[in-house]
Image: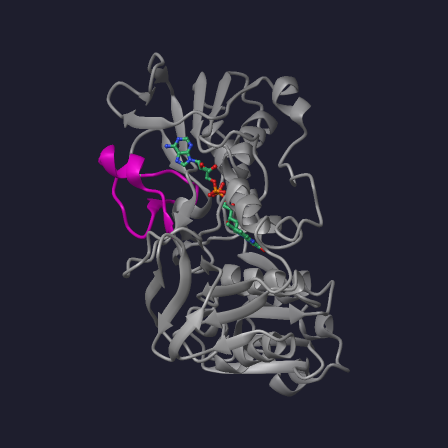
Amino acid sequence: MSDAERIVIVGASLAGARAAEGAREAGFEGSIVLIGEEPERPYERPPLSKDYLRGEKDDLSWVHEESFYLEQDIDLRTSTVVSRVDRSAKTVLIEGSEPEPWDRLLLATGCEPRRIDIPGSDLDGIHYLRTVADSAALGGRLGDGVRVVVVGAGWIGSEVAASARQKGCEVTLVEPQEVPLQSVLGTGIGEVYRDVHLEQGVDFKGGTSVEAFTGDAAVSGVKTTAGEIPADLVVVGIGAEPRTGLAEAAGLELNNGVPVDAGLRTEAEGIYAAGDIANQFHPFFNDRIRVEHWANAQRQGFAAGQSMAGAEVIYDELPYFYSDQYEVGMEYVGHAADWDEVVIRGSREDREFIAFWLRDGQIQAGMNVNIWDVSETIGELISSRQRVDLMALSDPETDLASLKIQ
Ligand SMILES: Cc1cc2nc3c(=O)[nH]c(=O)nc-3n(C[C@H](O)[C@H](O)[C@H](O)COP(=O)(O)OP(=O)(O)OC[C@H]3O[C@@H](n4cnc5c(N)ncnc54)[C@H](O)[C@@H]3O)c2cc1C
């Protein structure tokens, strides 16, 4: 157990709240202060582009019950911004308060939406989506016949396009690549998502870039390389940037977020990072990866809490994420930055399949679409690093678990 007496966590969202839980579970008995700028207690973001955005769900998906913080003696401070980390004094600064001392500090400041900087980008009616406030503001404007232009067909843009369409909006989805999600999934699987959107009546404009927003006070159109599109509102979903401002001002090394080791420690004594902001050395991949997904914040945050409490931690979980668009649900396990083969098991047309991304005959990642209870087996196949029989892998009649070398 560590001799730390005080843990301060900056960022009261999924990774931060789970870190507080992890520290307590590892037996940490000192003070834990969990500081976040949002007014709500920690909540989960996935519903913000899905059922919460569509108004089908009133309550947020809370990370913990309200009573948890009191029961676990976690000093949760919402609506509170940390303005600086002082490494030598081992404090964090909060405007209008005394400096807050720490023995262990966790940076769990997450990401913020990447901003678009083109003419007209400061017009009213241009939305970004990260917080519950963003989701409520956008959701309140979706409805029958509202003309929505979504810029960017990554996960958030694609999900927002689906939700807006489900709310009866006329949706145009503009993407510079040929198909949605092309850089993550490749063209063949991206086409599946393109076709789903087209069938649902979204006007998908692949290979198209946005050049300007037009309008007087509020946006009324989007100039693109494929012409001008009328718009009542615009949603920009062009990726997210890790919130590294505090780390940078504190003189921490930055490299695609905040680099940490397998125990979630930064190079600075006593300072840790987890969740979307952390670029972790991952023992399985023998490389750094930074993952902007729910399961990573959930599990890595918990692990960081345990590590701060003095437990021996090697975080080596495979990345996992999920997405829902219309009736198409998927889960993705693993990490395929590059691949030389994609194997499909099942039917892309029926939207019931598993896609595997392989390199040198080894599965790097797998994605099950409308097929459930297989992600654990896919994870085991990836972890085993075995070379699989491709015929058997592509054959839905062959039990996936039987492919594992015992
Ligand atoms: C709309 C949306 C939908 C998503 N859907 C999915 C999905 O379907 N599946 C999936 O796997 N992932 C999804 N994600 C991603 C997932 O939500 C994130 O990976 C996860 O929230 C990361 O958690 P985090 O705690 O690291 O960071 P965040 O959730 O970004 O939280 C960081 C917190 O730190 C606070 N903060 C930052 N700086 C300071 C400061 N100086 N002082 C005080 N507080 C500060 C922020 O206000 C924020 O509350 C989605 C994300 C969004 C935005």
Q: Is residue 379 visible?
A: no
On the picture, is 348 further left or further right than 20? right
Question: Against 206, is 100 above or below?
Answer: above
Q: Quadrant of residue 158?
A: bottom right
Q: Is residue 290 visible?
A: yes
Question: Against 249, is 279 above or below?
Answer: below
Report the residue at 36% width, 54% height from top.
114
Q: 200 and 84: which one is in front?
A: 200
Extent of the magenta region: 241-266
Q: 159 and 393: which one is in front?
A: 159
In the image, residue 259 lies in the stretch drawn in magenta: yes
Predominant secondary structure, magenta span: loop
Residue found at the very far front of the displayed protein: 216
Question: Percent position (x, y) of residue 378?
Answer: 63, 67
Question: Percent position (x, y) of residue 274?
Answer: 44, 41
Report the residue at 36% width, 73% height from top.
224
Q: Which color scheme is applied?
A: one colour
Question: Against 92, is 213 above or below?
Answer: below
Q: Quadrant of residue 220?
A: bottom left
In the image, residue 402 lies in the stretch drawn in magenta: no
Report the residue at 68% width, 39% height from top.
59
Residue found at the very far top of the displayed protein: 98
